[in-house]
Amino acid sequence: MSEKVESTGMDLLKEVANVSGKPGLFRILKPSRAGVIVESLDEKREKTLIGPTARVSVLKDVSIFTDGAEESVALSDVFLKIREIHGEEVTLSVKTSSDKELIEFLAEVLPEFDRSKVYVSDIKKVITWYNLLSKYTPEAFEVTEGEAETAAEPLADAAAEEEAPAKKASKKEKSKA
């Protein structure tokens, strides 16, 4: 992991997950016997129990395929680059933008992304997730001091333990986003 990511709140991505089949993002709260309890990242803040068979992808483990020397780039690095270029919100609409516009967006942020493995639907997810995180967890993009990082480590460790019931293996997901 790069120094840049470790010096920001991107470690919060250990607590944020996407649940297959459910829209939006969720903060992982705690494990239970029947799965994991999550809270939606939106105005409603609804708590839901996600069963052990659900596909839960923790954003810290998601990466985007590239053609470069490295096979993939962490989603956190992509989010930080989006923040540098586009600020707090990506104004490109995922519903009305053309495929070409979406591909150009990602090419601007990550020029070496693998066009054969990263689909337009993945780019839409990246934009949607970025806007959700920026709106509901802006602290993820703040630069933190060393003391604040050490205070956040127990939370990150707890989030990793909570992830275990929802995911059988903690393999790094070489996702399409």
Image (spheres, grey):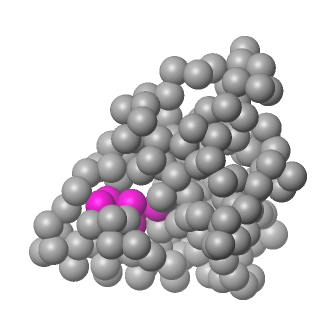
Residue ID at (48%, 58%): 77
Residue 11 position by quadrant? bottom left
Q: Can residue 34 be seen in this view?
A: no
> In this image, 25 relative to 80: left or right?
right
Q: Can residue 74 be seen in this view?
A: yes
Residue ID at (43%, 31%): 86
**In the depicted structure, whether residue 79 falls above or below residue 33:** above
Asked whether 41 falls inside the magenta stretch, the response is no
Query: Going by the picture, which residue comes out furthest to the top?
Result: 96
Q: Does the magenta stretch mainly form a helix, a strand or a loop?
A: helix
The percent coordinates of residue 83 (x first, y second) are 40, 41
The percent coordinates of residue 151 (x first, y second) are 21, 75
Residue ID at (15%, 74%): 146
Out of 14 and 35, give the one closest to the viewer. 14
**In the depicted structure, whether residue 52 falls above or below residue 119:** below
Quarter that holds the N terminus: bottom left
Residue ID at (67%, 65%): 68
The percent coordinates of residue 88 (x first, y second) are 37, 32
> In this image, 34 relative to 100: left or right?
left
Query: Going by the picture, which residue comes out furthest to the right?
Result: 116
Out of 77 and 165, give the one closest to the viewer. 77
User: Which portion, as a residue range, is magenta?
Assistant: 8-13
Residue 75 position by quadrant? bottom right
The percent coordinates of residue 90 (x first, y second) are 50, 28
